[in-house]
Image (cartoon, grey):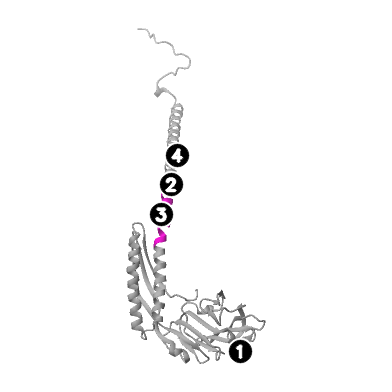
């Protein structure tokens, strides 16, 4: 029977796939692979775009949540800080009030302070409970350190020995008894407080005098009695006595920075406090010293065992806050 298949038209491929040339089959396979890679790149790009959008959304949500949480914590932070301030101020006032009662022995004094801390803990606990918090205040293992409360009249024989720290060191001197001087002549006649660091073979001097130019009072300082520098002066004294806060850095009611020796801030080697040119000046002093030795001279009669400082553990807790810290209480120390 005759073959009646229509003749191939222009553009039709002739022969079967197996009959096509090998290079044509290879080009077709390469085109398929290129198409696959293009699809993979497109899918990968789409996945990355979706991932980036998701990441941005999650990051924004996290930042928003953190901002809300931070605002809540900042507002709540005031509660433990207020508790800390109340505990520190209350304990400091308790220590000083107990020392001024002069029980005569350290055991009685320290027991009174410990009972006072327990009472303060109860009162602060009730206050915290009304605000939805739980607080606790107690003495740490370091508890209290023994010192001396010193008050009395000063003259050239007065001294306080083996002092490691000093706080609330104030003197009051009769303004009319001040000698006339200036910084260069103060070492000769001015009423002087001497900080004698025997171990370091160094002294620091604080001079109080009436300036020659007519001002009411002035203070100068020196090291080893040389190169005295005037720190401040006062035009008028309110009353008969001139109050000077040596640890606070004041003269009268005005600041007088730099009168406390910088190397006697914080824990130091023991030093002695002595006085010169104070005979006949009618000078009184009060201080709390970290020493176990009684002062000498006229100050001996005014010295009693005292609590120098206390170390407290403070804890405050609410549903959102956990606050736990340790703080040392020593009111009136020079700033470190």
Which comes sooner in the sequence, label 4 or label 1? Answer: 4
Say which of 209 and 319 sits in front: 209
Q: Distance of mark 4 from mark 2, alpha carbons? A: 15 Å
Q: Nearer the viewer, mark 2 or mark 3?
A: 3
Mark positioned earlier in the residue sequence (3 or 1): 3
Q: Secondary structure at mark 3?
A: helix
Contact? badges 2 and 1 (CB < 8 Å): no
Residue highlighted by disc 4: 49
Residue 294 on image: x %, y %: 43, 88
Query: Vertical placement of 116 versus 29: above or below?
Result: below
Q: Mark 2 or mark 4, which is nearer the start of the sequence?
A: 4
Look at mark 2 in the image and give the residue it sits on: 59
The N terminus - image quarter: top left
Contact (Cβ within 8 Å) of mark 3 with mark 1: no
- Figure disc tally: 4
Q: Which residues are magenta?
A: 59-79
């Amino acid at each position: 029977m005759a073959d009646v298949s229509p003749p191939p038209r222009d553009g039709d491929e002739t022969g079967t796939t197996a009959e096509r040339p090998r290079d044509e089959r290879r080009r077709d396979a390469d085109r398929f692979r290129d198409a696959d890679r293009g699809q993979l790149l497109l899918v990968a790009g789409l996945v990355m775009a979706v991932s980036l959008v998701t990441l941005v959304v999650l990051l924004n949500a996290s930042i928003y949540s953190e901002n809300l949480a931070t605002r809540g914590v900042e507002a709540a932070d005031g509660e433990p800080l207020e508790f800390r301030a109340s505990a520190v101020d209350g304990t400091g006032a308790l220590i000083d009030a107990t020392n001024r009662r002069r029980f005569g022995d350290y055991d009685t004094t320290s027991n009174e302070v410990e009972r006072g801390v327990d009472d303060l803990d109860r009162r602060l606990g009730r206050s915290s409970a009304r605000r939805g918090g739980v607080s606790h205040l107690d003495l740490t293992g370091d508890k209290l350190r023994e010192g001396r409360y010193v008050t009395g009249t000063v003259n050239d024989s007065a001294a306080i020995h083996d002092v490691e720290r000093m706080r609330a060191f104030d003197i009051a001197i009769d303004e009319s008894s001040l000698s006339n001087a200036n910084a260069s002549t103060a070492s000769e006649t001015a009423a002087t407080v001497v900080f004698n660091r025997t171990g370091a073979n160094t002294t620091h001097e604080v001079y109080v005098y009436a300036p020659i130019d007519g001002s009411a009072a002035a203070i100068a300082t020196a090291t080893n009695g040389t190169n005295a520098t005037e720190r401040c002066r006062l035009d008028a004294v309110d009353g008969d006595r001139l109050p000077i806060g040596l640890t606070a850095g004041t003269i009268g009611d005005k600041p007088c920075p730099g009168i406390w020796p910088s190397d006697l801030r914080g824990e130091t080697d023991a030093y002695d406090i002595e006085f010169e040119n104070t005979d006949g000046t009618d000078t009184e002093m009060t201080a709390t010293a970290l020493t176990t030795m009684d002062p000498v001279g006229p100050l001996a009669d005014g010295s009693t065992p005292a609590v120098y400082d206390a170390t407290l553990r403070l804890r405050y807790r609410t549903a959102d806050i956990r606050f736990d810290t340790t703080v040392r209480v020593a009111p009136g120390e020079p700033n470190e």
